[in-house]
Image (cartoon, rainbow, N blue to C red):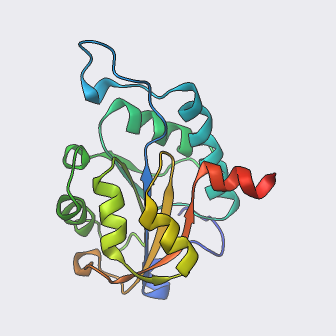
Amino acid sequence: MLDSGPQEIDAKKSATMRLMIFRHAKTEKSAPGMRDRDRPLAARGLKDAPKMGAYMARHKLVPRHALVSPSRRTRETWDGIAGALPAGIPVFYEDRLYDATPEEIMAVVKETPATIGTLIVVGHNPGLHETARLLIAAGDVEARERLNEGLPTSGLAVIDFPGDDWDKLHPRGGRLERFVTPRLLKAATD
């Protein structure tokens, strides 16, 4: 069993689910003839993903399960995040998350077993940003306003839901627990 501390949500104990939405880190521009799925992370992205992973570990934001788009940039982002988290988090590369709409993202999330109380989805905009905005009904007003403005690369939205069944996930059912970006972390340490 993965023990990540007091902030980890365990569906069996608390009847609360936590969804972490993470946009991939900064990427290189596409080279001529390169498929979009093959774009690698830029130097900044290779630095930001581990920093965000360290933030997640420090704040006990440890997923029990990871759903990751199969693109190169999302895989590299997950590798950067996961390097700072406890080992052994199951990761599933889900083709349906590439270029997904909010409805497609929610359909994938709804397939998550109820025994998994904390889930991370690593994917792409505009789908992830639209999904976060669709799911949130409450939470810190300032954080919600920042998220409404956009979900930048390496942006993390943590959304809590009452209940213990991902299949019952629905629009406006969640509370934004926090919204963090590399820029916000840097501003907090300056």
Q: Residue 63 vs residue 187: left or right?
A: left
Position of 27 relative to 35 (above/below): below
Nearest the camera: 120 or 23? Answer: 23
The structure residue drawn at horizontal position 29% and vertical position 75%, both measured from the top left corner, is: 166
Q: Give the image location of residue 87, x and y in percent.
A: 56, 47
Nearest the camera: 46 or 91? Answer: 46
Q: Is residue 176 visible to us here?
A: yes
Q: Give the image location of residue 84, x and y in percent.
A: 63, 45
Nearest the camera: 50 or 128? Answer: 128
Q: Give the image location of residue 130, x and y in percent.
A: 30, 62
The structure residue drawn at horizontal position 49% and vertical position 87%, both measured from the top left corner, is: 14
Position of 128 relative to 35 (above/below): below
Q: Residue 49 vs residue 168: left or right?
A: right
Position of 155 relative to 81 (above/below): below
Residue 103 falls in image quadrant:
bottom left
Nearest the camera: 145 or 39? Answer: 145
Q: Give the image location of residue 143, x and y in percent.
A: 55, 72
Q: Is residue 85 visible to us here?
A: no
